[in-house]
Amino acid sequence: MSLSLGQIIELLEGADAADLFAEARRVRERVFGKFVFLRGVVEFSSYCRKQCLYCGLRAANASLARYRLREDQMLDAARMAVDLGMGTVVLQSGEEPDFSSDLLERVTARIKETLGAAVTLSVGDASDEALARFRRAGADRYLLKVETMDASLYAGLRPGDNLEKRLDRLEALRSHGFEVGSGVITGLPGQDAASLARDILALTALQLDMIAVGPLVAHPDTPLAGAPHGSVAVCLRALAILRLLNPLANIPATSALQALAPDGRARGLRAGCNVIMPSLTPQDVRGRYAIYPGKNIDPGIEKNIAGVKSVIRAEGLIPSDAPGPSPRRLHEPGSPPRGAVGHHAAGPA
Ligand code: SF4
């Protein structure tokens, strides 16, 4: 399917939202069946050298009590993810000032060898040498969000960075053989429907394997303190449009949706999402991975995951513990697979 910029703007502004969501669910079901992939996120370090204006982990946020997990803690969290029915472990952090490729390489290799789960990395910019090492260690996927495809917004929100460099890194990830994920924030100050519509077309043109979109949740300890939060409704419409334009992409119902609406995950599924990524970060530090307020404020890991599975079932869908690779890699573009591919149901939490 293709949509013009004007059609996307109309849909973002609320035209035919019920039809849009129904069609997005139909497209999801055609590719993924009833299955929703669970990915366990291990947020192993909250240190970051960057200064993104919207993010609570920015280096200038002196009020954040930072933490860094030890290798054994990372592996324990990964094991717990698999035990609780997740076929993918996502290793995530801020952009570490003392980034250790060795650590990530070792942990990735151990997860692949001992747990058999797919591994996604989400650790910001890394050198080509580091990327090659991660691939050799077995990392399957890499998530590197752009947050906005508007070059001037990007430069303002991510001091010291530019969009062109970020897009180059996405190309580098692809050339190293990763399944590549990216995404944007909706509701950024200065973003309007036309700018978000252009983001949607630009993300689609990248032919991504994963697309993550969440609303801005303004953090009180950042320069965006007091900015209005992004609209949940607009974010859901953006997700549904992306599903129509990218039938083969894995698209998560993001935790930022849940931070702004108690039924955010369920609404994400109703908008055509096919992935949920609960945090497996250990209980004593998980609340400190505060990229935005409300992140990881939940009743505890097991209860949270049991809750996620019941949300999925309540939508008539099935939680899957399969690794859930990118259907784009399995099928030629334009030939969506019929029914679900490589899925199996996760047991009760
Ligand atoms: S968005 Fe990422 S790179 Fe930017 S401050 Fe937050 S953790 Fe660091």
Image (cartoon, rainbow, N blue to C red):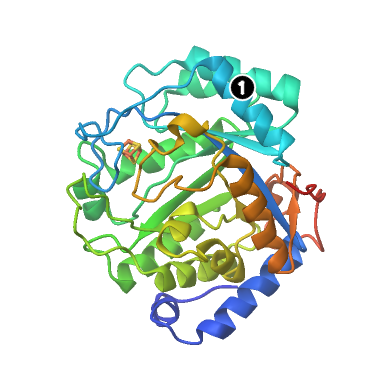
Q: Position of residue 222 (x, y in %)?
A: 21, 45
Q: In x, y percent, where is residue 106?
A: 59, 14
Q: Is residue 118 shown to the viewer in this render?
A: yes
Badge 1 crowding class, 10 Å Cα cut-off, few under 14, some 14 to 19, many 20 or more, is: some
Residue 51 shown left or right of residue 333 in the figure: left
Identify which residue is drawn at 40% across, 33% down.
124
- Viewer-proximal residue, 166 or 348? 348
Q: Image quadrant for the N terminus?
A: bottom right
Within the image, what quadrant is residue 198 found in? bottom left
What residue is shown with label 1?
75
What SS does tag 1 mark?
A: helix
Q: Residue at x 22, y 34 (%)?
A: 63
Which of the four quarters of the rendered structure image does ligand 1 lie in? Answer: top left
Where is 75 relative to 43, above or below? Answer: above
Residue 112 on image: x %, y %: 70, 24
Name the spot of residue 344 as percent of width and height, x first: 82, 49
Q: Residue furthest top?
A: 102
Three-letter amino acid code at disc 1? Leu
> Measured along the vertical axis of the image, is residue 3 above or below residue 205?
below
